[in-house]
Amino acid sequence: MLRKLLTGLLVVFVGALALLTSPLHTNAATYPYDGKNPYATGCSSTEVTKYSKSFSYQYTYGKYISGTVYLKFSTSCKTAWSYVKINSALPSGYFIDGTVTRNTDGKFYRCEDGGNGAILPGQTSCYSGMVYDLDPNTAYASATIYKVDDWDGYVVYQSGKTASY
């Protein structure tokens, strides 16, 4: 009788311990191409533009920062990434970052994450790292303009966001 009781308590203890040590939430999925550079991997060789969205911000009277954010997709790698192209060189005091976000789990990569870095003054484009984007996954691309500010570090001024694919 005592042996059955001890065995039962041991089973309950091990079960409780397993519940306490197991993760209580699920993490974002990780696929082989997540965060990788679309050009270094060769995925860009089969790229198509799925969606695009124009954006514009008037930073001083009569002067604009404007461009387009593209959701790129690789038909061979089944990945998506953000590509941002502005119409003229970025003026000083600003930077622009492009981001691709997978809707399924919220995983995202910016131009600084696996891409070629944010658009800095004098530059005109950037691309992000990739996310796996085969059904049931979907993703969208976005671009954000930041103004460098002595008081706050930086201020977000404008965003453009594509539809999801």
Image (tube, grey):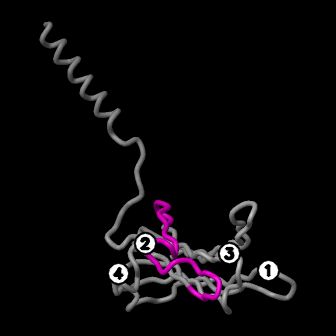
Gap in angstroms between the C-alphas marked 1 and 2: 32 Å
Residue 124 location in percent, x, y? 61, 89
C-alpha distance separating marks 3 and 1: 10 Å
Whichever of labels 1 and 2 marks the residue nearer the N terminus, that label is 1
Q: CA distance from mark 1 to mark 4?
A: 39 Å
Q: Secondary structure at mark 1?
A: strand
* Label of residue 77 in the image: 4
The image shows residue 95, relative to residue 19, as above or below, that is below
Dot placed on the residue nearer the N-terminal end, 2 or 3: 2
Q: Residue at x 41, y 71 (%)?
A: 35
Decide which of tag 3 and tag 1 comes sooner along the chain. Answer: 1
Q: Which residues are magenta?
A: 103-125
Residue type, numbered disc 4: Cys
Q: What is the crowding at mark 3: few (fewer than 14 residues within 10 Å), some, or many (at least 20)?
A: many
Query: For the residue labelled by badge 2, is the local secondary structure a helix, a strand or a loop?
Result: strand
Magenta span dominant secondary structure: loop
Is 112 included in the stretch rendered in magenta? yes
Q: Which residue has dot 3 on it?
A: 145
- Look at the numbered discs 1 and 2 and tell me whether their residues touch, using CB distance below 8 Å: no
- Disc nearer the start of the sequence (4/3): 4
Q: CA distance from mark 2 to mark 3?
A: 22 Å
Which label lies toward us, 1 or 2? 1
Check contact, mark 3 vs mark 1: CB within 8 A: no
**Residue at mark 2:** 131
Q: From the viewer's perspective, tell me whether residue 31 is left or right of residue 124.
A: left
Name the residue tied to disc 1. Answer: 59
Is the C-beta separation of discs 1 and 4 under 8 Å?
no
Tell me the SS state at disc 3. strand
Location of residue 152 by image quarter? bottom right
Mark 1 is on which residue type? Tyr
Q: Which amino acid does the dot numbered 3 rest on?
A: Ile
Q: Nearer the viewer, residue 115 or 103?
A: 115
